[in-house]
């Protein structure tokens, strides 16, 4: 079965939530490996107070990052697995 393509512009602005429905914020930007094009992180925009307690990795500008490996679904929302973040 062929994997459906998705474009980065389709991810930007989407709300990021956990499997349990906890809201993290929105996708503000994407970090990817230049050589391979592999997505590495989602950069959170408008992070919620819930993310403050998680001690997420941050970029040079202090923006909170979610590892793309933690993303388990993408549709109306970006669903992440909290266990895979920490």
Image: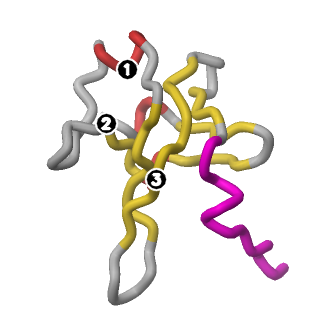
Q: Which residue does the numbered mark 2 point to in the structure image?
A: 64
Please identify, in this view, whether the residue under mark 2 or under mark 3 is nearer the observer: 3
> CB atoms at circles 2 and 1 under 8 Å apart?
yes
Residue range highlighted in magenta: 1-13
In the image, residue 53 lies at what x, y percent? 29, 13
- Element under label 2? loop
Instruction: Out of 14 and 81, give the one closest to the viewer.
Output: 14
In the image, residue 70 lies at what x, y percent? 47, 46
Above-or-below relation of 28 to 37:
above
In the image, residue 29 lies at what x, y percent? 46, 53
Residue at 38 percent of width and 49 percent of height: 67
Q: How is the image coloured?
A: secondary structure
- How packed mark 3 is, by other alpha carbons closer than 10 Å (few <14, some 14-19, many 20 or more), is some
- Tell me how far mark 2 sits from mark 3, CA to CA: 11 Å
Q: Which residue does the numbered mark 1 point to in the structure image?
A: 51
Q: Is residue 16 left or right of residue 76?
A: left
Please identify, in this view, whether the residue under mark 3 or under mark 1 is nearer the observer: 3
Which residue reaches farthest right? 1
- Tell me how far mark 2 sits from mark 1, CA to CA: 8 Å
Name which of mark 2 and mark 3 comes first in the sequence: 3
Q: Quadrant of the C terminus?
A: top left
Above-or-below relation of 64 to 11:
above
Q: Which residue does the numbered mark 3 point to in the structure image?
A: 29
In the image, residue 39 lies at what x, y percent? 45, 67
């Amino acid at each position: 079965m062929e994997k459906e393509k998705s474009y980065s512009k389709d991810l930007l602005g989407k709300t990021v939530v956990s499997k349990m429905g906890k809201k993290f914020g929105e996708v503000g930007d994407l970090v990817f490996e230049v050589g391979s094009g592999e997505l590495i992180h989602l950069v959170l925009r408008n992070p919620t107070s819930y993310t403050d307690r998680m001690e997420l990795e941050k970029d040079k500008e202090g923006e909170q990052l979610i590892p793309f490996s933690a993303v388990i679904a993408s549709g109306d929302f970006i669903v992440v697995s909290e266990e895979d973040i920490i």
